[in-house]
Amino acid sequence: METYSAAQKQRLIELNADSTIVNREFETIEERNKCFKMTEKEFIRDNKEKLNRLIEEEHIPLTLRVEDILEDWLTEDEGFTRVATPIIIGADKVKKMNIDNDNHLREQIFWLDGRKCLRPMLAPNLYEVMRDMYRITRKPVRIFEAGSCFRKESQGAQHMNEFTMLNFVELDSVRDGEQMDRLETLARGAMKALDIDDYELVRESSGVYIETLDIEVDGIEIASGAYGPHPLDANWGIFEPWVGIGFGLERIAMVKGGYQTIKRAGKSISYVNGIPLKL
Ligand code: ATP
Ligand code: MG
């Protein structure tokens, strides 16, 4: 039995062929090469059609549309306010998140110099803004940010060094004990807005206070939620109950678009709206 050559497989993956196509078997090399040519041609035609559709009708790539959908849901239906904070953060913030201790994120941070780094998450800045807004208004705070985060990853189909997180946080909106219910309600609301029916909410608890709620689609984690009171809160001057969820926008686009790898959904000069530009 013959299978596609490494170069042929690579090309088919680039064109978003799924594993049944990539791992096809053949009687002879000639048959294989003929099939490759035909399959490649079909995928090129499909991708060209997709590009035309984007240019003529859709105009906004899927990952950015995902951001728009979540933004509309949060601002129009749930009363959240969008904020934008710096991508470059200080080492003191990393310390306050306890990332410098035994956290897997410790090795993943892009340091610019000893005192500054590219943010690996939005939580540190959101903690600060949320606390100050609460101090001024003394009302429940509902804010979110969507923007790039950076982690040194060993790559793979679900990780990129630069990705887009949308993180919302809600402070003093529910009583202590009601946080998990609130998280679930918001997680389900987000999935409804995104038109994703097939998902799982996965609760995990470690320690007394630390309980998390992940949203998974086909075994892929697309978001992680957490709540407080949390052991880190005191570092940030927060003492009221809060809930928050961080969504990976490229992961959502990946599952919605049926992409085999996340790179298709990420910031890129090789792909536009999941379409490879090497056509
Ligand atoms: P994973 O376990 O998949 O590496 P994580 O639990 O470390 O992810 P979180 O800190 O929970 O990630 O970040 C919130 C969300 O951001 C994740 O649920 C995921 O959707 C997304 N995300 C995290 N890291 C990456 C990455 N390197 N590339 C793309 N998306 C990511
Ligand atoms: Mg997570």
Image: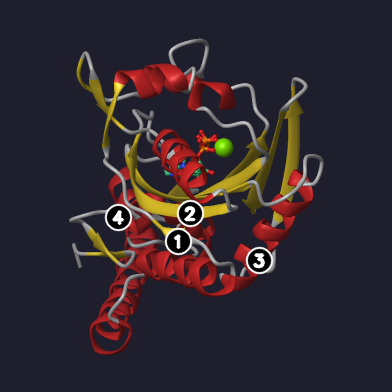
Query: Mark 2 = which residue?
Result: 143
For the residue carrying disc 3, how many other residues have a C-alpha within 10 Å: few (<14), some (14-19), or many (20+)?
A: some
Q: Secondary structure at mark 4?
A: helix
Report the amino acid beneath label 1. Answer: Thr
Q: Badges 2 and 1: C-beta atoms under 8 Å apart?
A: yes
Badge 4: residue crowd in 10 Å (few <14, some 14–19, many ≥20): some
Residue at figure coordinates x 63%, y 31% from the top left: 239
187 or 197, nearer to the observer: 187
Looking at marks 2 and 4 on the same chain, the residue that comes earlier in the sequence is marked by 4
Query: Mark 3 or mark 1: which comes first in sequence?
Result: 1
Label 3 amino acid?
Gly
The mark found on residue 11 in the picture is 4
According to the image, label 1 marks what residue?
81
Q: Is mark 1 within 8 Å of ligand 1?
A: no
Residue at point 32%, 79% (across, down): 50
Foreground tag (3 vs 2): 2
The residue that disc 3 covers is 189
- Across and down, in percent, residue 201 comes to 73, 50
* 177 sits left or right of 232 in the view: right
Given this view, does label 4 or label 1 mark the residue nearer the observer?
A: 1
